[in-house]
Image: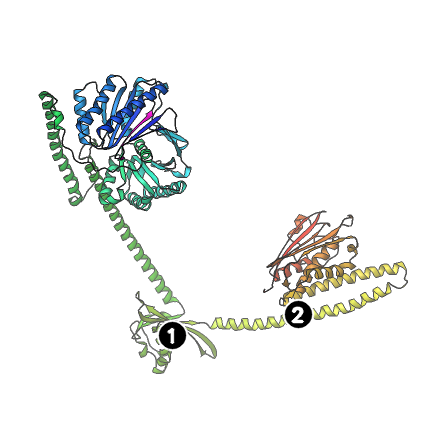
Amino acid sequence: MSELETITPESKTKHKLTYSSLGHDYISIIEQLHDQVIQVSLKGKPSLTDTEHTLNLYDKMIERIRRAQGITMFYLIVDLNQFENPKANYRRLIIHKITEEIEKGVIRYTCILSPERVTKARMKILSLFNKNLKISYHHNQFNALERIEKEIAHIQSPALYTPLNTPYDKSWRKRKYIQVNGRPLRIENHPDWNIKAPDRSYELNVFLIDNNIILIKDSGHLSEEYAVQSGEIFQKVLEKAGRKLYFVADLSDLRSATRRARKAIKVIGEALYDNWIHHYYVFTGFTKTLFLIYKSIQPQKLNNATIVDSMYEGLGNCISDQEFGSRLSLELEEENYPYEQLNQYSKEALIKLIQKQQGEINFLKRNQSKRTKEIFEALSSISWDETFQPKKLKIDDPEDVFYDLFNAVTILQQDAFNIVEEQKNLNKTLEEKVLERTQEIRLKEANLSSLIENTTDRIFSVDRDFRLLVVNRAYRQYLFENYGKEVTSGHRIADIFPNKIFEYWMPFYARAFNGEIVKKLETRKVMGHDKYYELSFYPIRKENEEITGVSVFIKDISEQQAQKQRLLLQNEELKKVNSELDKFVYSASHDLRAPLSSVLGLIQISKTENQNEQINGYMDLMEKSISRLDHFIRDIIDYSRNTRLEIKKDIIQFEKLVGEIFDELHFLEESKNIDRLVEIDQQWSFVNDHRRLNVIFRNVLSNAIRYSNPFRNDSFVKVAITTRKHEVSIIIQDNGYGIPTEHLEKIFDMFYRANTHKQGSGLGLYIVKDTVNKLNGNISVSSQVNEGTTFCITLPNLSTE
């Protein structure tokens, strides 16, 4: 044998002693639950020696608490839930010890926990003949603690009294710890672990306790919607814990659950079944009955479920499971009534006991007959009463043997009533929908018939015998005017047309009967004009895809064909005009530039001669005017080329390109006092249209130079270029005059000039924008007056590598 002493982590004043036999087939645990509450837990079947060691262990615990805490009076809980019935002399030792401790004033009150009827009978007989023995029988630890709590509160000042269990209220959602059976447990709750119906008809709070127990507390009327949400919350808590959990559900305040809600809970329970170590449920009559009904249908799903009287009992059982290991599943043998003890009592006492039991038996017989009649009446009304309404079977005593059965019948009645009502509503809804759908179909048929009958297109359909099924007015009129026959549904088209015409169209019908949609364009001469008709043959299918006929649509498309011909002619004429316009632009621009170039050359030569200053001044004016004209003509050429020419793929060397542009613009008067800053990061080969890039750089850079601020000594134009695998980023920045905010949105419009102090065509930035769009790029601008302007351009890399 071995003896183990443990100090619990919650408080150094609470003690625990454990005794185990050599074969570990008997264990006794003595622990201090509260300052004055001692629990003795006995498991297995003891020998005489085991019983003596347990009593010695008890004496040691009492003495230790006296020395440590000065406590001299205690309340005792004896847990026999897993205790096998010992022999009579062992029992006498235990009873003698309890009686002795009570007489000495050490034990004030004793609670016995046991599921066995024989143990309960012995305790009743013992208390009947020993008036000093303050003892009570309980199903569970919570009820025992509750009874002791009342005793403690009665003899102590409320200010000095600490509850063994933290009362449940809304503060639990914010607490970090709660007391359960005198022990502090860590508690956790999050906002999304709670449900509260807007109409307050239902509320659910879910807690994670010690990262080992999920506690569910709900109230009100459960609907299918909230049942599904509760399952989602359970899943969240499981994910937070990251392990299997004990499951404690307090359903004592749940008033009802719809049939659909119960089905949803069943699905959720089966899906999460393997995540629970053990289930503990707190029920009222309604919920307990539902549990028993479900257990009778699916016993294997609830083999690890236990009904408890309170959530504190459930939580306490979870703690005990963790501390003492797995639950001992002992098969309790049926014991004979303890007749040997009856020999110790008087004849009068025995007669009194027998009379009491006989009275209880007679009451049960009368009650059974009454209850059975009520059940038959309720169940019969379901089958035979056409005006059936659920009948509430009233029963208030949970100890009544008919309590669960009455509740089950009430639930079954309500379910049957709900099913009947749902069926009635379903039939009514179905009838309404059938009527509504029939009306819709009739309306659609009427609309379709009206459409077919009144359209100018010729429409008809035939079955496999080529009898007309449907024939509209336009086709009837056509047949009468061309063949002199009035036709209706049922006529065979073979009897209407000459054989030659019928045989011509037979292959088209055959293709449609084989499942193909056939189109045919026909041309006819009508009064000297060409008429065009489009004939369409469509298979008519049943639901099983069987083809039963063919629908034929004959549409006069003469106007569309004429319009198409007109468009083709107009396109040809437009191409011709565009070609001629391009030629004109090229001719005009080249013819204009040639003499201007000559004049510019002569002016340059004349300026080298010794002329007076007045002539040189005129020459300067002529040069400026001709330069403006040349710039304008160049803009026209650039715009024309961008519109007309396809994009070319050229390998671009940005350093060379930018250098050439700056050299080209060096003649501008404003460029003399401007610093040129160029930063090029060309790590990727870049492919695009060289001509169009030249246009973009030339126009943006010329604007930056022309609109520089002459009053600054630090004027600059900066070009930053970065190539990437799929694109290039171009930033052109200056510190010139800048553009007022009200002009920024319009600077890319044709002929728009934001600055009237400088001469320009108003085409440059329009051409830049048009060219960037042609290259599938993007351009943006930002500017501040007297601070400068920045253009950001992004162009795609057309490289195929």
Q: Is residue 344 left or right of residue 598?
A: left
Q: Which residue is mark 1?
A: 478
Nearer mark to the viewer, of 1 and 2: 2
Residue 176, label in figure? none
* Left or right of 320, for residue 582: right
x and y percent of residue 613 in the render?
A: 89, 58
Rendered image: mark on residue 582: 2
Q: Nearer the viewer, residue 718 or 153?
A: 153
Q: Left of 561 or right of it: where is 196?
A: left
Going by the numbered disc 1, the residue's amino acid type is: Tyr
- Place of residue 751 in the rendered image (x, y in percent of width and height, measured from the top left): 68, 58
Foreground pick, 450 / 377: 377
Tell whether 136 sits left or right of 367. right
As measured in the structure, the alpha-carbon distance from the residue carrying label 1 to the one carrying label 2 is 53 Å
Which contiguous range is marked in magenta? Answer: 23-35
Task: Specify the quadrant of the image occupied by residue 543.
Answer: bottom left
Q: Label 2's element?
A: helix
